Image (spheres, rainbow, N blue to C red):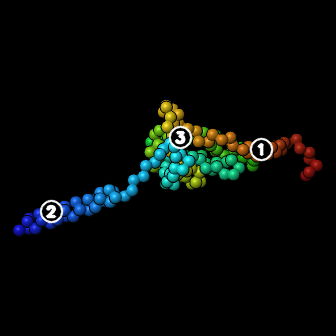
Amino acid sequence: MGSIKEYFSSVGQGVKSLLVGMGVTGKEFVTPKITEQYPENRKTLHISERFRAELTLKYDAEGRHRCIACGICQMNCPNGTISLTTKMVELPDGKKKRKLDKYTYDLGSCTFCMLCVTTCPQDALEFSNDFEQAVFTREALVKQLNYRPEPADPVPAPKPAPVTADAPAAEK
């Protein structure tokens, strides 16, 4: 007897599921359809803020990017889309610091997962809304993100002359 009860219970669940699906389909029949007249309406076309099109570096008012070349975005990228090249520079106080030399991004192999943006400790990356990325060759999809010339850093202070043993003995 339990099998007949289970049979009719599953038939009832199937009919209920069918009606829910038909309700969703029925709503789509009565909603107004909107046709975008692209590319004629480029200027008025609304792109959602959540749309991820192309990775970009954030720049401040002075024209400096926030990237400190830590490489976390490169390590977290699941398919090697990001490649960083760094260089060592000397700071005004004489210390050496790693600095971003070249930030390469391959738009053609990006999965738009946003792991690079969410794990960046300096909030230096974001996705733009520029959806028109069509090119004729795959090589054109490989882009250097730090293409702007950076403002010059302050010149390091000259190092003090070393003290020699030939110094005058009058200071004793």
Q: Which badge, 1 or 3, comes first in the chain's sequence? A: 3
Displayed quadrant of residue 121 = bottom right
Q: Which residue is mark 3?
A: 105
Are the residues at dot 3 and dot 2 in contact (C-beta closer than 8 Å)?
A: no
Q: Residue at x 63, y 40 (%)?
A: 147
Within-10-Å neighbours for mark 3: few <14, some 14–19, many 20+: many
Q: Is residue 4 above or below residue 34?
A: below
Instruction: Please provide percent x and percent y for residue 106.
Output: 50, 39
Numbered marks: total = 3
| Residue 2 in the figure: left or right of residue 18 | left
Q: Residue at x 76, y 46 (%)?
A: 154
Within-10-Å neighbours for mark 2: few <14, some 14–19, many 20+: few
Q: Is residue 5 above or below residue 156?
A: below
Q: Amino acid at mark 2?
A: Val
The numbered mark at residue 87 is: none
Q: Amino acid at mark 1?
A: Val
Q: Which badge, 2 or 1, comes first in the chain's sequence? A: 2
SS for callout 2: helix
Residue 85 versus residue 47: which sits nearer the camera? 47
Which callout, 2 or 1, points to the residue nearer the camera?
2
What residue occupies the far left of the structure in this picture?
1
Compute the Cα span from label 3 to label 2.
Answer: 54 Å
Q: Is residue 116 visible?
A: no
| Residue 20 in the figure: left or right of residue 84 | left
Residue 124 versus residue 132: which sits nearer the camera? 132
Instruction: Please provide percent x and percent y for residue 16.
Output: 21, 64
SS for callout 1: loop
The numbered mark at residue 155 is: 1
Q: Amino acid at mark 3?
A: Tyr
Q: Which residue is mark 2?
A: 11
Residue 96 versus residue 61: which sits nearer the camera? 61
